[in-house]
Amino acid sequence: MKRNVSSAWRRLASDKLAMISLFVLIAFIVMAIVTPWVSSREDINPVNTGDNPTWASPSREFLLGTDYLGRSVALQVMWGSRVSLFVGLAATLLTIVIGTLVGITAGFFGGWGDAILMRFTDWFLVIPFLPTAIVLASVLERSIWTIVFVIGITSWPSTARLVRSQVLSVRSRLYVDRARALGAGRAHLIRRHIFPNVLPLIMASTTLAVPISILTETTLSFLGLGDPTEVSWGSILNEARQKGAVTRGAWWYYMPPGVAIVMVVLAFTLFGRALETVLDPRLRER
Amino acid sequence: MRRRFVIGKVLGALSTLVFVVIFNFFLFRVVNDDPINSLFRGRNLTPDQLERLRVKFNLEGTKWEQFVAYVQQLLRGDLGYSLKSSRPVTTVISEALWPTILLVGTSTLIAMVGIVIGYRAGWRRGSTFDATATSMSMLTYSMPEYWIGMVALGVFAASLGWFPVGGLNDAGSTLTGIERMLDQLHHLILPATVLAIAYVGEYMIVARSAMIDTSREDYLQLARAKGLREAEVRKHHAQPNALLPVVSLSAINFGFILSGAIAVESIFSWPGIGQQTAFAISGPDFPMLQGLFLMISAAVILANLAADLLYGYLDPRVAGR
Amino acid sequence: MTLLEIRDLHVTYRSERGDVPAVRGVNLAVGEGDTLGLAGESGCGKSTIAASVLRLLPKGTDVRGEVLLGGEDVYAMKPGRLRAVRWTGAAVVFQGALHSLNPVKKVGWQIEEAVLLHTKVSGKAARARAQDLLVRVGIPADRLDHYPHQMSGGQRQRVLIALALACDPHVLIADEPTTALDVMVQAQVLALLEELQREKALALLFITHDLSVLTHTCRRLAVMYAGRIVEEGPSELVFTDPQHPYSRALAAAFPTIGDATSRMNPQGLAGDPPDPAALPTGCPFHIRCAVATPECATVDVALRDAGGERRAACVHVGASHVGDGHV
């Protein structure tokens, strides 16, 4: 297993695009972590920005200009990265955990449980997930955790399906039968045989699920369902639009958050695809 | 197609719809026990008036009684009243229906160009065309649709003035007939293109990988051995098989495009279902949200059913023929 | 009249890992009404030869030598001529019929397509011809409108045979046509092939890894190893009295029916076929050979005359050297 990991890493490292994406992601994560050290929340509190020029285009003082309240756009984007990245990652974690549990349970135990779980999953798959997320978010209290919960709850079905089909194919492999014949218990089978074979798939699909979670979070924030006390890239865009940034031509207000979203999402997607290719040899020719 | 296949799919769709109705109902009741109280708090209404309001908004009795009443209402075609405007939800929705159909329909047609691009890219995998198409698709796929809308508005409407900044018709417009239609078309172009750009990537990527998988199949070698030209091999043997995953995707994509319309309609002040949803969120106007959710889900379930049946028609292995 | 002739064929696949020489100098010829079997294990290059006859190799593959169909070099043909010759000059019966047939098109349509492509007949006439072909291979006529997945493996293989005959080719190449089938079905399909071959005086090139099948179906037999023919001659003789150590091992691996002792002692062959991308020096077989001499590791052996119509590429065979001749 260790040999697999190092050879996989080497293959990944040779993919230039993947490495650039990784670099971009790390840069954003660093930015998110470092923000509280280079600025304080008060810097973007409208109470304190009254003296700043409003709607100012980029200058040496304000690298990305200011918004309608005189707040620095650059700082907002930095603070926003924390929320968008955190929610994206946390929601994905929730999705993966639920999806994996359901997938392994359904795939491994089969029978009635499988049938019921899959019927349930299929329902959830058909229902359009943004409206569901909207409805859930509007019913619950507006907070970051709500968003995390809402995204996690609506996105697990596709992971569950993926995991289940992998579990089914692994289960049918001969060595699992042999292990069972030797008297291995279910927990042992899951831990030693099923899980390690499902793990690479889970890892790859995790990386591809993050962009979806991030995009969903920004959309929900844009529609006003986010945490009103937090700044997120989606909420910045929402405010920008509502205050007429588009018609005023204040491109420095609405371009940067969008570009940030695109960069992060694209980086995760490219890295995820590269990871998928490395972990699943069959995909290598894509 | 075998009747069993069709009936099975229809029953499946119905069961999903039932699930949606149940889910829809209990979702709203779970958190908000008595919205009437909180909504009309400062209004000095007598308990009697409050009680009448509760009846009007179907909020009296136990949860189970409420559910039964809700289903009865549904079957009568009554979706309740908007908390904001007090108008029947069904009326609001029916007014907003056509603009959304127009927008989503047009966008989907434009986005399907992605299928053709994807086929070509997949058939000539690794070519410059393929590389360009794939990069562009991944780029647009990473952009939030409302942001594309904002940028498009900023450039084409606000700056260049080529297109109106929103709406289906200009405010106070008195155009009729052909002129009115052309004007609406003019308003349609930007939002439809924006929505299409956001989802064309999906179509392209799926069509491409479908074509790549198909291009590896052995029956293509046999087709060439027969003496067919490459174009004929692609058209008669590869594409019919590569079409199958694309059909499945179309159903899923329909759900995404419809969802994407929520934000895009909001940006472009397009008087459709999406805009109504955005309005209902800032309320929150629960009966409205409930009705809209039901409508949107029903539309997607229907689209999935249609795609399943189409798939069964195209792939003889599935429908039990 | 020699209908199919392959002269000094070299086929090298180009891959990311480097060049892979799949065929390294093969000569063979099949005349009208003649049957030649080509035997060998996976990776020896026999399927490559099948694909090379109609130029079905992947783009970029390096091909040197000549493949003559009715005297014309396939590799010198213009695209239009090539397409005309495909299926009419020579046709291929592929293996694994489930994957060789288009799953979303009816079986009848797939045969009609070939007919309509090469002959100027009406749709009705093409359909009638497809029907006749199906009946000739033992499939009920109503199966015309069936899909491949609705048929059994044996039936699908027959469809492939019917399809191959659709344009009355002179040359038929059967690439492992019975490999994926049950033994009983195998026998039926083989019988059908033999019957058709005799009836239409086809030049048949039968490719397989199953030697025992070839001895009955083919008059002559050639054994391939590592991209070369290592032995050739009348099939009966090659099977019962092999001259090359590899053929000996291959023949011994198949128990002879009726001979109890051979059934009890199938002789396997140690080692694996060589990787075409990394061939051993000298005679490619010397590593696994029971009678290798020190010379074998350095000297590559060409086919030598072994008496009668037989030739084998081994130092232990005959004293005289034969140049490039044909069987």
Image: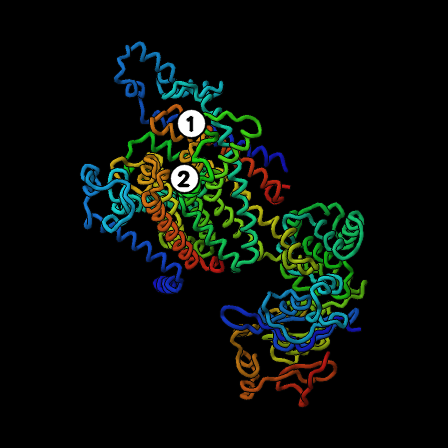
C30 lies left or right of B258 = right
Q: Which x, y percent locates residue C76? A: 70, 71
A58 lies left or right of B20 = left
Q: Same subunit under labels 1 and 2?
A: yes
Q: Quadrant of residue C298?
A: bottom right
Q: Name the chain letter of the residue that bears numbered label 2.
A: B
A241 lies left or right of C125 = left
Q: Which x, y percent locates residue C176? A: 65, 63
Q: Which x, y percent locates residue A9? A: 36, 62
- Relative to A178, say whether B49 is above or below: above
Is any part of residue C11 visible from this angle? yes
In the picture of the structure, the residue carrying the numbered disc 1 is: B22
Q: Amino acid at mark 2?
A: Ala
Give the foreground label among 1 and 2.
2
Q: Residue at x 49, y 60 (%)?
A: A285
Residue B158 badge: 2
Q: How is the image coloured?
A: rainbow
Given residues B134 and B223, the one toward you in this image is B134
- Relative to A49, say whether A18 is above or below: below
Q: Amino acid at mark 1?
A: Ile
Q: Quadrant of residue B308?
A: top right
Q: Residues within 10 Å of mark 2 (few under 14, many from 20)?
A: some
Q: Residue at x 74, y 62 (%)?
A: C84
Looking at the rendered image, the quarter that the C terminus of chain C falls into is bottom right
Q: Name the chain letter of the residue that bears numbered label 1.
A: B
Q: Is the Cβ of the residue at disc 1 closer than 8 Å to that at disc 2?
A: no
The answer to which of marks 1 and 2 sits earlier in the sequence is: 1
